[in-house]
Amino acid sequence: MNTITGKAVVAGVVGAPVRHSLSPVLHNAWIAEAGLDAAYVPFAPPSDGFARLVHGLRGGVIRGLNVTLPFKEEALALADEASPRAAAAAAANLLVFREDGSVFADNTDGLGLLAAFAAQAPGFSPTAAPVVILGAGGAARGAAAAFVEAGAQVRIVNRTLARAEAIADALGRVSAFPLSRAGDAFAGAGAIVNATSAGLADEAGLDLPLEASPQGCVVMDMVYKPLKTPLLVNAEASGRRVVDGLEMLIGQAAPSFEAFFGRPPPANVDVRALALAALEQKS
Ligand code: NDP
């Protein structure tokens, strides 16, 4: 256990709810291994209390915050300055509080997504074939922005077509498909990324024509509880490579850690094992 003194650097995660967040597990394991005088703590303001929290933290009371549901869009709107990738995603998962009182917004979810592909689907190239993203909410838009930035052609498939079209209009190099035409979007795809919340809360998941995608298509699910979602189970059963949402979560945490503590996380901590153990306890 590292010692926390009066000089400790404090960062945290804010969400509603936040009690199931794995971020404190990841960051505090890295802090301990690096021997930092630091702490990473959860904040759970009421759903109308996020702006007050951010206002109160201006001036560097704490170093920064990761932001999760439902505050990511509000986080971007409250910031004084934003990175191009946060602006493209129209959401921030990272706020940095500067000593001059200003707030800088960034979005590391896209970095996490690409890192997850690099770790679990080595050799995958976003420019080799179109990337399909299922969903048109905040996570889908962030994923689309990251893949467009990486040079991909993106196809967004969504139940509500107008929301997919809005992302296509905003980002360019993105085409929109209704869910009923998922098979057309899958044809020739290099990857399929589920960024919908369908299947959560025991609701039935999406019934997708995976067979319409090439055998070499990589299938990714942002949902990580369960770790192997029905989509990933089906994809693996058909011989396709899969990438899970936990790897994305870890992938967004690493650049956040660097933004808070000025150094990359130590490489020799098996944070995936720690996160899996924490998921087990919560189930
Ligand atoms: P939103 O609520 O903003 O968007 C939800 C999307 O899912 C919409 O496109 C919606 O379609 C679609 N959807 C929901 N239910 C159904 C259904 N029954 N059938 C078809 N489509 C459906 O959520 P977010 O974008 O914020 O998050 C999406 C998922 O990604 C969540 O599960 C979240 O936990 C996960 N996530 C994981 C991260 C990670 O690090 N692993 C990071 C960020 C998010 P419509 O537009 O028609 O309503």
Image (cartoon, rainbow, N blue to C red):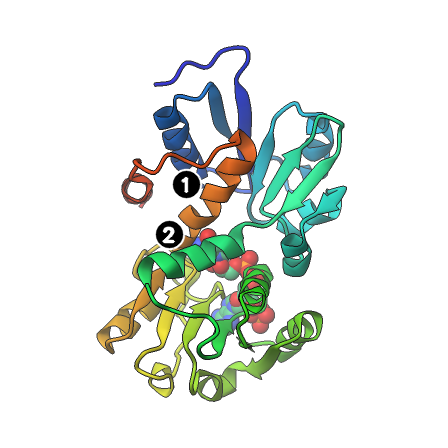
In the displayed structure, does residue 157 sit left or right of residue 232? right
Q: Mark 2: which amino acid? A: Leu
Residue at image location 37% in from the left, 52% down from the top: 246
The quarter in which the N terminus is drawn is: top left
- Kindly state the secondary structure of the residue where label 1 is placed: loop
Could one spot residue 168 in this view of the protein?
Answer: yes
Check disc 2 and report the residue beneath it.
246
Q: Position of residue 172 (x, y in %)?
A: 66, 74
In the displayed structure, does residue 174 sit left or right of residue 244? right
Q: Position of residue 196 (x, y in %)?
A: 49, 66
Check disc 1 and report the residue beneath it.
22
- Kindly state the secondary structure of the residue where label 2 is placed: helix
Q: Position of residue 66 (x, y in %)?
A: 55, 40
Query: Marks 2 and 1: CB-CB under 8 Å?
Result: yes
Q: Decide: few, some or many residues near mark 1? Use Cα within 10 Å; few <14, some 14-19, many ≥20.
A: some
- Disc 2, ligand 1: is the CB inside 8 Å? yes
Could one spot residue 43 in this view of the protein?
Answer: no
Judged from this view, the residue extending furthest toward the top is 6
129 over 3 or under it: above or below? below
Q: Position of residue 157 (x, y in %)?
A: 53, 77
The disc, 2 or 1, on the residue closer to the chain's N-terminal end is 1
- Disc 1, ligand 1: is the CB inside 8 Å? no
Q: Mark 1: which amino acid? A: Leu
3 over 124 or under it: above or below? above
